[in-house]
Image (cartoon, grey):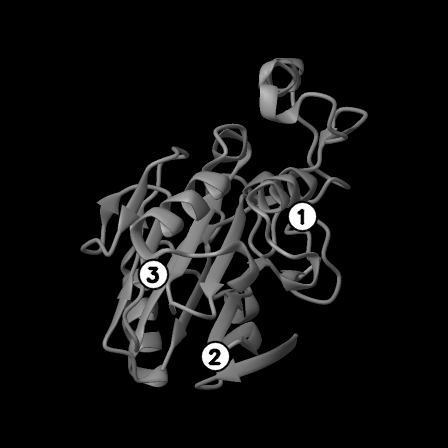
Amino acid sequence: MKNILLDERFEFVHESMGGANFYFSTAYNEISFKIDENEGILNIDKLKEIINLKEIKYLKQLHSDIIKVNPKSEEIGDAIICKEKNIAIGVFTADCAPILIFDKDTKAMAAVHSGWRGTYKLILLKTLQKMKEEYGTKAENIIAYIGPHNGVCCYEVGQGVNEEFKKEDFYNNKNIFEGKNLNITACLRYQLHSFGVLEHNILDTNLCTYCAKDYKLHSYRKTGVNSGRLFSFLYYR
């Protein structure tokens, strides 16, 4: 994992692995990818130009478990699957977890947006199952990269959320809380392990959007409604 600067404006945590390129934006230079604002759309267009991509696909996110396969941009959903080269797919976050997935064999890709609602609804596991259904993805060929999100250090949730998770059979008897704090990372790892993803193929930036010291990151909980958005995406050539 290293940080790179594109066009002297866009800072990303970046990794090349298995033939794919994984990018997680920061809030360096106050750059935001909030797509309901003109700045966000312009920044997406600029990225497409800088990296020389045919297209950057993304969705209108709503904290669901809706998965779209090779959609037109701005369809509604929270996970996007595609396997076309030189096309990037990505998700927007400001505390929720972005997960980027690449199948080294079939070249299928996925980008998943998972806050507590998506995590409760098992959107990551469902996305992996959809990749298997659509492209024959096998667990041993998966690389999964968990991006910056509100860590267990800072992610206190209400009693109602706590009770919802305890009622979900998948999380029964699993260690996903530290006091009042929900461990999204642990939840995501449980989903990856459930599908059979190998531990050495699960990567994590280990960055908390709320308290990270080495990078400036957007955090809705920290800044409120005026918070910008991070953009996490991947592609292969």
Sequence-first disc among 1 and 3: 3
Sequence-first disc among 3 and 2: 2
Q: Residue at x 73, y 51 (%)?
A: 211
Q: What is the CA distance from the residue labelled 3 to the residue labelled 2?
A: 28 Å
| Spot occupied by residue 148 in the image (x, y as percentages of width and height) | 61, 55
Q: Secondary structure at mark 2?
A: loop
Where residue 178 sits, quadrant-wise, is top right
- The N terminus: image quadrant: bottom right
Identify residue for label 2.
19
Q: Is residue 60 visible?
A: yes
As drawn, the label of residue 99 is none
Q: Residues within 10 Å of mark 1 (few under 14, many from 20)?
A: many
Identify residue for label 1.
210
Sequence-first disc among 1 and 2: 2
As drawn, the label of residue 40 is 3
- The C terminus: image quadrant: bottom left
| Spot occupied by residue 88 in the image (x, y as percentages of width and height) | 34, 69
Q: Secondary structure at mark 1?
A: loop
